[in-house]
Image (tube, rainbow, N blue to C red):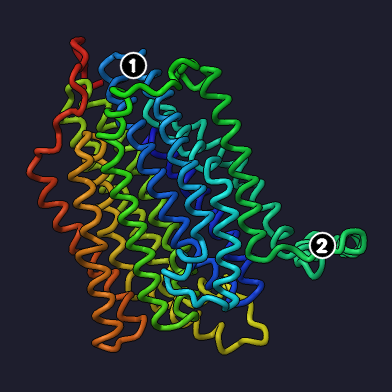
Amino acid sequence: MALSAPIVASQVLNVGYNLADTYWVGRLGADPVAALSYSWAIVFLVVSVGGGLTVAGTVLVSQHKGAGNLTQSYHLAGQTLSFVTVVALVFALVGYVFSPWLISMVGATPGTDPHTMAVSYTRIIFAGVAFMFWFFIFDALSRGWGDTRTPLYLMIVSVTINVVIDPFFILGFQNNPVFAWVGAEGLEATLYAATGFEGYGVAGAAVATLISRGIAAVAGLYLLFSGRVGLQPELGDLRLRVETVREIVEVGVPIGAEQGLRALGIAALTAIIAIAGDDAVAAYGIVNRLSSLLFLPALGLARGTETVVGQNLGAGQVKRAKHAVYMSSVVVVAVFAVVIAVAYPLAEPIVGFFLEAEANDGDVEEVVRIGAAYITIAGPSYLFLGVFQMMLGGIRGSGSTRAAMLLSIQELWIFRIPIAYVLLVPVGMSVIGVWYAVAISYVASAIITAAWFLRGTWTDSVIDDPSPHPQTDD
């Protein structure tokens, strides 16, 4: 809990980016929210691959630290930074050029407002994707070392900046409700008269995210190389070495592939939902942000579990590694049960909070109805999702990243996507059928992963040179 609590808090704050974007873009109507949903399917794909690669830093740094190989931990930190930066630059170039085609592939119709707005948002995110990856790297390396508080502090600063500047970049200085909230209507008129700035709309959310992420990334790299977080990589560690890159790839690529395939599955699911129309996509975008309030904290707890498992297996403490997974599973189920019980009767007000009813009342009401149905249908299955993520965290922490990859992608590609398509198209259940597919996939994947986890074959340490020093269970 000491390791995971800051990670969970950081993940909750990370949701702040998405919720702030969704809330303020929702002031513009249903089409901009749909544009954000189309774009996020692509952005999530790239972010997931990059974030997956950085987990190699967590696993390798934690296990080498547990084994007492501190110098190798420093070296791996520098190598991970250089390798993932190269990947980020490649993604930035390819993503920027192919954004229009990618947005079309997830179901947006070229020439429509949602497509145009989604392309603008996506290209801005790709232009600054290196900043996002740098913060992911700092977060992963600090986590592997055992420092989960410093990334949290940077996340607090970053999210605060994003929340403050979001409404202005999106809505500009005219008819912006922020001025009324703080009683500064006179300042609103003055600023608008001086600048004429009416905001960038959906693209403004991307600009705000880029600025806030960039500040956190630069601060994180400074702290990393200053040695203030414990790790002390040197400039020489940035020069890529084939043998170290091979080690990072061996651990990181399966995780990156896992995250990438999951994100690709989200994109495919978005395309399937698009068959039901832009209202369905808008509703999916909102409930996706809401579900991240549960999923990302669970992921944070899983990340803490990865570190505990990695360090204990590196020290030869198999029993403690298993115990960490069991305890984190109990915690996540207890928390999820409370949250779901509270959200269940408030489904429609929760979804409606992110949309402003204006001239398109019919569209807004339909989006709210569809989104609320997701909470009531898929909500209880998140108990299984929580346990599923904790077991995957333990498996990844052991270095069994290929097994984790296969167990993770089966939830989407074997269960959720095929069932969603069948229920939506041949059966004719509309987007409600997709919500049932989500619930079925979480339950089935949790059962299968538990069966594999209980075999116990995942506890082999990934490093070849464990510490010869005796360890204790203290």
**Nearest to the observer: residue 228 or residue 317:** 228
Q: Is residue 30 visible?
A: no
Q: For mark 1, what is the residue?
A: 72
Q: State which quadrant residue 253 falls in.
A: top left
The mark nearer the N terminus, 2 or 1, is: 1
Q: For mark 2, what is the residue?
A: 197
Q: Is residue 45 visible?
A: yes
Furthest-left residue in this view? 455
Query: Percent x, y for residue 189?
Result: 90, 65
Query: Percent x, y for residue 224?
Result: 51, 24
Query: Percent x, y for residue 175?
Result: 79, 70
Q: In the rendered view, would you say 48 is above or below 87? A: below
* Residue lying at 38% horizontally and 74% vertically, measured from the top left: 374
Q: Amino acid at mark 1?
A: Gln
**Nearest to the observer: residue 306 or residue 208:** 208
Crowd band around label 2 with a 10 angstrom C-alpha radius: few (<14), some (14–19), many (20+):
some
For the residue labelled by badge 2, is the local secondary structure a helix, a strand or a loop?
loop
* Residue lying at 60% horizontally and 68% vertically, measured from the top left: 117
* Residue lying at 43% horizontally and 44% vertically, measured from the top left: 8
